[in-house]
Image (spheres, helix red, strand yellow):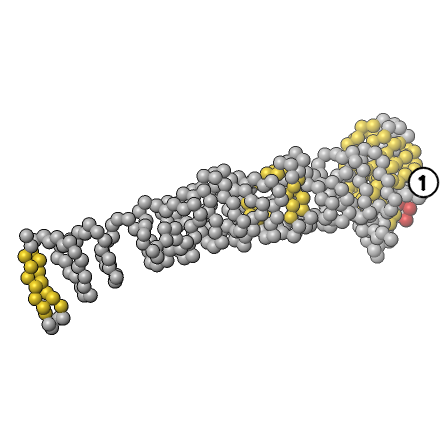
Amino acid sequence: MANFGWRYRQEAGEWDGSLTGNATIDGTISGSSTLRLGTSLSASADVAVTGSVHANKFYGDGSNLTGISSTPTSLSGTTAQLTTGVETSGYLKVTGSSTLGALTATTYSGSSTIQSVGKAYFGHNVYITGGVQAQALVVANAGIMSTTYSGSSTLQAVGNVVLGGTLNVTGNTSVRGNIASTNGNISTDNGNISVGGAGSWNKGPNGGLAISGYMSGSTTLRLGTSLSASGDVAVTGSVHANKFYGDGSGLTSVTADWGGTTTNAISGSSTLQVVGNTILGGSAHVSGALRAKQIHIIDHHFFQSATAKRFIPFTYQNEATNPSWETMFVAPFNGRLVRFMARCAGNGQDGDVTIGVHTASNGTALVDGEYTSEFQVETVDVATNTTFTVDFTGSQHFTAGQGVGVSWDIISNPGYCALTTIWEFDMTGLPIV
């Protein structure tokens, strides 16, 4: 049973009343103002409202509502938060920025930038028609395949790089490890190829290192095989090798120095200088002039009946007790007496024999009677018609322009004598015309 209490509020222009308990109204409630209910409204028939219905939530069948699309083409506003997911048979288009958690997609396509703050894992191939920019390292376990790679920054490959085509590099290529070419070539037209650290070049069985421009470096180039060049090899530093072959006529400041012997021909249009001894097993053919310390041989023939010091004649057939014009010659070069050989038909010689060299400087008519340069005392024991030899020491006994003579002081009357003196003249200073 409901209790009603109503009054008209003139200042508000409305009826104000209260309903205590439950009320069942079989007719129509109509009004042009506000109906306020302090509890729930339950109606078994329609509730017709010509104005708006405001509520925190709506429940029930909304299929008869108008102005609401069940398949909207766009969603605008502020933030759309979905807890169960978004499923679409078409595509998801975002004109602004989107922050996503884990994203699983069979295909992702876009004309702008896709940015992944964390890691991005792809279980299949990634096809990119444009460029790829990465500020950090890109790791691909199965490799990276591309018909063309272009960039203005650094391309770093920690593992292997397999190229099925040509690698064109317009700038510099720096390799810290090895570059191996199995069947192809590594070429550069105008750039540089540099290997840093302990890197090396490996040549394949059918390939090579082909450079149509130049190879330049500030360190060592080591080759495990031969270096073949159809042009010049210009080295601003030094070239070290165990042996050199080819034409060396363009070399300067070269002094030949080798040990042992050589069986090859030595030919040249310039100077051949040998500091040490030279032993020739064959003939020496000199088409030009030869300047050296050369040997000169002089024969002496005379008769001597006295046993005393005598001067050996050069143009006269008798010895002389004192120096004369016949017992000297003018030295054409600096030189020395190398050897004295004598064979006598008179008495044999048994004892000390003294052989001496005498000189006369300019302004003096004859050589000095005393030994002024060199003398040699030799102990001999020879029979008649037997040759004895006396070798001299010393590097120089006279100078060019001096008068030179030789004497001997023997033991017994020698009789007829045949002597040979061997002289050495230093002709190295003689001009070559």
Q: Residue furthest front?
A: 27
Please tell me in which quadrant of the rendered image residue 302 appears: top right
Please state if 385 lies on the left or on the right of 259 as rendered: right
Residue 317 against residue 350 in the figure, above or below = below
Amino acid type at mark 1: Gln
Q: Which residue is mark 1?
A: 317
Q: Position of residue 410 (x, y in %)?
A: 83, 35
What residue sits 60% from the left and 50% below the top?
A: 169
Q: Residue furthest bottom?
A: 11
Please state if 187 lies on the left or on the right of 346 as rendered: left
What residue sits 21% from the left and 51% below the top?
A: 45
Q: Position of residue 220 (x, y in %)?
A: 60, 45
Please state if 260 lies on the left or on the right of 400 as rendered: left
Number of numbered discs visible in the structure rendering:
1
Q: Nearer the viewer, residue 310 or 156?
A: 156
Residue 46 against residue 186 in the figure, above or below = below
Q: Position of residue 300 (x, y in %)?
A: 90, 39
Please tell me in which quadrant of the rendered image residue 248 appears: top right
Q: Nearer the viewer, residue 60 or 334?
A: 60
Regarding residue 397, the answer to whether it shows in the image is no
What residue sits 58% from the left and 41% below the top?
A: 163
